[in-house]
Image (cartoon, helix red, strand yellow):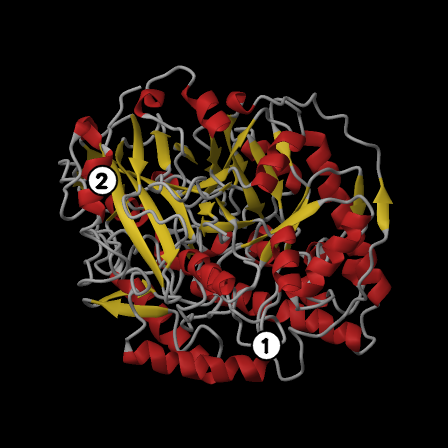
Amino acid sequence: MKSVRMMPWAAAVAAGMLVGCGGEQIAQSGDAFSAAADVHDDPQIIENTEEIDSIIVDMNADGGFTRKVFETETVLMEREADPGAPDAEAASDRKAYFGDLHVHTTYSFDGHSMGTLATPYDAYRFALGEAIANPAGFDMQLSAPLDFYSVTDHAMFLGLFNAASDTSTAFSRNTFAEPYRDFNAAEKNGTDIVSTLRRLATFASFLPTASGMIAAGELDREEALGIIRGTWADIVEAADQYNDPGKFTTFVGFEYTTSTPDMGNLHRNVIFEGSERLPREPFSRFHSTNPEDLWDWMDELRDMGVESLAIPHNSNASNGQMFKMVDWAGNPMDDAYATQRLRNEPIVEITQIKGTSETHPRLSSRDEFAGFEILPYRVATNALSQIEGSYVREALRTGLTLEEQGIANPYMFGFIGSSDTHSAASQLDESTYVSKLGLLSALPEQRGSVPRQGLDGEFSYWFTKAAMTLVPSPQGKGMFTRINGDVYARGSSPLYGASGLAAVWAEENTRESIYRAFRRKEVFATSGPRISLRFFAGYDLDDSMLESAEAVQRAYTTGVSMGGELAAPSGLEAEPQSPGFIVMASADPRGAPLQRLQVIKGWIDAQGTTHEQVVDVACAGGAAVDLVTQRCPDNGARVDVSDCSINVETGASQLAVLWHDPDFQPGQRAFYYARALENPTCRWSTWDAIRAGVDPRPDLARTLQERAWSSPIHFLGAQ
């Protein structure tokens, strides 16, 4: 393995030059930060947000989105045990497996409203490498099969829209189903603006209509539960049918889609370890909107032998609510809260289509790569999401603050990525990306990467402005904007990203082995490419391990891997011993080469103030890290945005380094995680523009740097 090393003395000089968040703000890198995402100071967007907040209050005046419809239960469906495959115990034999734990099909109310007819069975065929149809009629296919996959349809009224639309069901003949019958008949599958508005209106009204009719006795609660339970059973059956121990792994899962009253996103995906013992219905916001009630439900099931974990996602859209320092009721956190949360939520989704939640340029002003695929709005709105409390790096720092206050840390989580596709098909490749919204994103004009031309553009602009003025919605006063005279889609869709993947280090491709990796947090995230990333810490790691055939085995034996906890060194009366950190990364053979490896550190000082630091630790081409800036020099990587070609010779297929933290203090709590960056490549919106023969949209990033993030290693400090 080709290696790049930074010796301890050099790292010491470099690290001393960049401390915490001090100093001047560093500009975001190159052409990779969308101006359309940097809107928190835009007076018009701020005004729109205030108006939308009022609309959201009015929309939920009757409690349609927060109404408790079902009683919480933990009745199980009994099933035959899946024999799985024999366990393998050798940590050194762990391999990187890539998958997606966030996939919606026609059984999700929003997926069906977007025209998706693909079933869980279709989703698993797609993950295995087969082509499946987009609702607009073209095929979607991965460049290579995935190793694991989970269909996580929305638990709220699971399968109800599908049953109402399907005219062969008895349910489709009741009063509730009348507006939804044959909703996705071929003659209704247009991509024009009128068809789009029809689908958006249905998306917005379906849930409150269903909950309201149940509350009024106009829709039978037990009939709805019967459909939910039957749909859930079919999801479980599909997962078991395609689970192939040693070759392809499926997990039974669902999405718990809750939010705050102002639509701050608090969504979680619940993933079950096995399928032999499962609840007969999933837990939804119509059981409770309080995530703590979800954890109680999971704990009760765990006592019955049903093991699961929940994975929060899109904290970036939580309006500051995902990583607070108080509980749901607004009370200060205590140890019981922290312990329960971490028991049920050991990992978080750091990147997906609806934005990356690692950090924000306003939180990490000394990190020029912080602006990666930022989406500034709350889900299903054009209202700004509060930055503070919404990003995982800040949450890691908040955890240190809670520890300093004598409270257990609820934010010692690992990182994964996933897609949140609503077409059953992960959208991971920038060059073939068609977003996640079925018939609402099938065309570049709908995605906002290409302008709507001529009369179509003018009609779309003025018609939606008038419609949304007469009938206010969380989308604000219009779905379109003018840029240099051209009409483009506005809001979230242009800022969606072709992301991401969940990755694990596991002994074998089985439910048992991969789930154990989730639990020990030996997981990492990528923005789409299959970059392999390892991260170890320990006191007995040395340079020779970078090229040794036994390097990984020795690292597991003498240190801890990503997701682990590192205790303080012994013998504090002697000179403190700094731990070593090994970072190893391999590029995706189908992607761009690697440009650099970084270590991100966060710590809390004696005054109780938290800090963060980003250090380049390895550079492509054997280049040395600059001692002043702590950054790799420009490696000459370029993108020709006329055709998206790149100069691949400037990057590395593999990078490895042993790094010592020169500012290490044995009594100071800290966290460390690794980040691997590819050379720049074209963003999906640039690919769309090239194919359409137009200039790339000026307020979107033309390029990006795909990346991978390791789970953090937490240094516990001297007690």
Q: Residue at x 29, y 64 (%)?
A: 36
Q: Is mark 1 on a helix, strand or loop?
A: loop
Mark 1, other Cα within 10 Å: few <14 / some 14–19 / many ≥20? few
Query: Which residue bears the numbered disc 2?
Result: 11
Q: Can residue 183 be seen in this view?
A: no
How far is disc 1 from disc 2 in space, using C-alphas?
A: 43 Å
Nearer to the camera, 42 or 140? 42
Q: Which residue is drawn at 40% across and 62% down?
A: 492
Q: Where is residue 548 in the image (x, y as percent from the top left)?
A: 36, 16
Examine the image and state in which quarter residue 216 appears: bottom right
Q: Where is residue 384 in the image (x, y as percent from the top left)?
A: 40, 72
Mark 1 belongs to which amino acid?
Gly
* 207 to 719, vertically: above or below: below
Nearer to the camera, 170 or 260? 260
Q: How many marks?
A: 2
Q: Which residue is drawn at 24% across and 55% down?
A: 19
Examine the image and state in which quarter residue 10 appears: top left
